[in-house]
Amino acid sequence: MEIVCLDLEGVLVPEIWLGVADITGIDELKATTREIPDYDQLMKRRLKIMSENDLGLSIIQKIVKGLKPLEGAKEFLEWLNTEFQVVILSDTFYEFSKPLMRQLEWPTLFCHRLETNASGKIVNYHLRMRDHKREAVKALKALNFKVYAVGDSYNDVSMLMEADVGIFFRASTNVIQKFPELPVTTEYNQLKKALIEKNLFRKGS
């Protein structure tokens, strides 16, 4: 039995915070886990910037509604669902992921929660659990799944290392150079091929 665990942003959809930065003009929000490996440090920085710029949840939700999945992502996900069980493991938040999930036809998503005050200002964030991507992979392996994982950033590495097969997809050069042992793909057809070739249960079938 096989299951594929995918990161969301950078693999299936654009980086949400980059979209927010582009629309609002707040360049400080362009930092992602590709540049800052420590997720807690990154989120505290984002919350501080949002507070300083009076940027509430409703504005981010409006921006996310205008985002589209990456070109070819929906077709890739449709194919993937015919060959494997699929779970998306993301460090995004349920409070603004719904428009993108709707466009991807509601795949299973494990992510985190935001805390807002009465005025809609984001005041805190709550992890589902620490290192949840890796922990999810560990749990699935304990359920006797062979796990394939795909990601693009520092916060995906523990998941990729824990999986039976971990694959980078469109990762930045600095991430790739730091973890040369992980195979790299840049296009969905290439990723498809890598998943099929690494799928030992299907070889020769």
Image: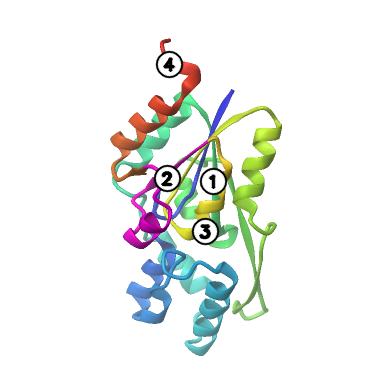
Left or right relative to 107: residue 115:
right
Q: Which residues are magenta?
A: 165-183
Type of the residue with mark 1: Met
Q: Earlier in the sequence, mark 1 or mark 2?
A: 1
How far is disc 3 from disc 1 in space, using C-alphas? Answer: 11 Å
- Pointer 4 residue: 203
How far is disc 3 from disc 4 in space, using C-alphas? Answer: 31 Å
Tell me the crowding category of disc 1: few under 14, some 14 to 19, or many 20 or more residues within 10 angstroms, Cα based: some
Look at the numbered discs 1 and 2 and tell me whether their residues touch, using CB distance below 8 Å: yes
* Label annotation for residue 155: 3
Residue with the most extreme top position: 205
Instruction: Identify the image quadrant of the N terminus.
Output: top right
Look at the numbered discs 2 and 3 and tell me whether their residues touch, using CB distance below 8 Å: no
Q: Secondary structure at mark 4?
A: loop
The residue at the point 40 percent across, 26 percent down is: 196
Type of the residue with mark 2: Leu
The residue at the point 32 percent across, 59 percent down is: 173
Image quarter of residue 92: bottom right
Asked if the magenta segment contains residue 136, the reply would be no
